[in-house]
Image (cartoon, helix red, strand yellow):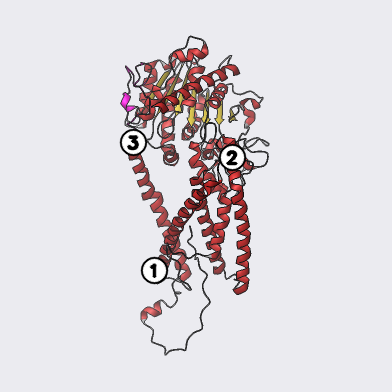
Amino acid sequence: MSTATETAPEPAKPAKSAKPAKAKSAKSKRNAHAAPPLASGKRPPRAFERRYNHWGLAGALLFFSLSLAPSLMPRGGVAQGLVSGITAVIGYGLACAAVALWHYLHGPVPHGTARRWILRIVGAALGVWLGVAVWMFVGWQNDTREIFGLEPLSPTVWPVIILVGLLVGWLLLAMGRGFRTLFRKAANLVSRWLPRRLAVTLSSILTLLIIWGLLSGAVIDAFFGAANAIFSTRDSGDKPLVVETTSRLHSGGPGSLVKWDELGRQGRDFISRTPLAEDINEVSGGGALEPIRVYVGLKSADDVQGRADLLLAELKRTGAFDRKAIIIGSTTGTGWLDPNAVDPVDFMYNGDNAIAGVQYSYLPSWISLFADQEIVQETSQTVFSTIHDYWVTLPEDDRPQLFLFGLSLGSFGAESVLTNVNVLNAPVDGGLLTGPPFFNPLHTMLTDNREPGTPEWNPTYGDGRTVRFTAQDDLLDRNTGTWGPTTRLAYLQHGSDGVVWFSPSLLYRSPDWLKEGERAPDVSDEMTWYPVVTMWQVAMDLAGAGGAPSGFGHEYAVHDYTAAWAGVLNIPGWTDAQTEAVAAKVQADHDAFDAAIEEG
């Protein structure tokens, strides 16, 4: 957005013949120290007026060209138009701000022929740059799309990019001009009592604080409140093919302390999709137990502790503490536990396990990622402490193994559990944290303090004794030292996942994961860091990461989960062949399930 002056002031015109001086009023004397209103020279353009600053247009053209460069995610016409439109306005605003600052500092300004030639040369250079970027764009995108296994993009996408880009840029520039008008009016008002420059400074700061307060307070709270109200009604509906359970080993079934209709949309789906013992036997060869799945919805109790107590009661009721393992899942915003992640565990333990989860929000991940950080930590810590406090009272040689799982914001909650003092006194057996958001403190610490020579997207920390990292290919065994033996933690993350790799520092610094020779296999060799532009591109990649094909972005595949769990669970005698068999069976079941949904 542009809040800077878009037109350079004109030189002062020669004064006309002097007129007889008039006596100054008292008010004139009080304001004699104040400079005239900010709008000296040409009147600044109104919000939708078709008048533009030449240097602003140059900045917009430069940033538009840079926005066409590839980033983590492939982009179609609408997405690219959105990115380019926003980026171009950022370039326009920065250029206008630079010009305004230059005039403020009384820097030399070319006039006449010199100014025209400078504009021509800059325009020609930017035109060539834009031409190259336009020519290369489709090829860049198709390189990324090939990595993702997507169909190639056609040059016919350009009309969509231009239309969307122009519309977005036009609207944002109008908003920017509106804010500038607000700043100017505030400055003109305050300058009645204060010197002009002091008035401009103080009024700008005050106006910014007011706008920020409205956006971060009333506006954001209203948005989150409205979103919560909207998605809470959706929580009462069901996903396709959900069938009410009849098993006593499931929450919501006969004898359960949790009512079926209180499990929430994601909870009912989680219970309904529990693998059958006969399906597990197809892989194990026989002897499978019916897996235990317990879940507590947001409506099941009035507060977090009440839901945690209810989950523990469900684990006790179903006999979960007599099984080989319990996996405590920290859900995503809506309460989702990814079937790609949890189903393989039931097969790997031949059904002799329990998986538990608690809902803490109605909001989808793209909202809850920023709105629910505190509640996911509170829920994860309370649920874990409640279960862990009971678990440690059981005989050490006669209690189930205890594992943690978290995807996306769920991994943020799981990390908060790992810093719990109770974990230090009686450690969990392991945990799998997938797609950790960029603000996860433990993940950031481990990555920043990785061993020299290891890439940021797949680092080694402490020789892999406690925590290891993996991606599309099973990379857990690349550390040759001992893993565990007490606790095994693993991070599963894609190099193309913007949720993981976004950072405000992209504004001014190239990340290590873009260094030559240190890129993940799913990141284009053509991706280049540019100040400001790359940060905005990766921010858009973050927003769209959940729409990537399975195995890329924020979509984690069955096989990758199964291989990661094989390392974390460390089941005695487990083989790579069993990992492949489980992954193939679970994937086939999921494909059949999706096909049934499509058939209606």
Q: Amino acid at mark 1?
A: Leu
Find out whether residue 57 is within the magenta segment: no
* Residues drawn in magenta: 233-262
Which residue, given by chain and number where applicable, does mark 3 sit on?
Answer: 232
Question: How far apart in space, not on screen, are marks 1 and 2 (Cα)?
Answer: 53 Å
Residue under the image location 57 percent in, 34 percent down:
149
Question: How far apart in space, not on screen, are marks 3 and 1 (Cα)?
Answer: 46 Å
Instruction: Decide which of tag 1 and tag 2 comes sooner along the chain.
Output: 2
Q: Is residue 390 left or right of residue 526?
A: left
| Residue 351 seen by the camera | no
Q: Nearer the viewer, residue 441 or 101?
A: 101
Give yes or no for contact between labels 3 and 1 (Cβ–Cβ under 8 Å): no
Binning the other alpha carbons within 10 Å of mark 2 as few (below 14), some (14 to 19) or many (20 upward) gives many
User: Looking at the picture, does residue 138 appear above or below residue 240?
Assistant: below
Binning the other alpha carbons within 10 Å of mark 3 as few (below 14), some (14 to 19) or many (20 upward) gives some
Which residue, given by chain and number where applicable, does mark 1 sit on?
Answer: 189
Image position, residue 452 (x, y; %)? 67, 37
Which residue, given by chain and number where applicable, does mark 2 sit on?
Answer: 144
Image position, residue 393 (x, y; %)? 44, 18
Q: Amino acid at mark 3?
A: Ser
- Magenta portion: prevailing SS class: loop
Find out whether residue 252 is within the magenta segment: yes
User: Looking at the picture, does residue 271 appear above or below residue 507?
Assistant: above
Q: Amino acid at mark 2?
A: Thr
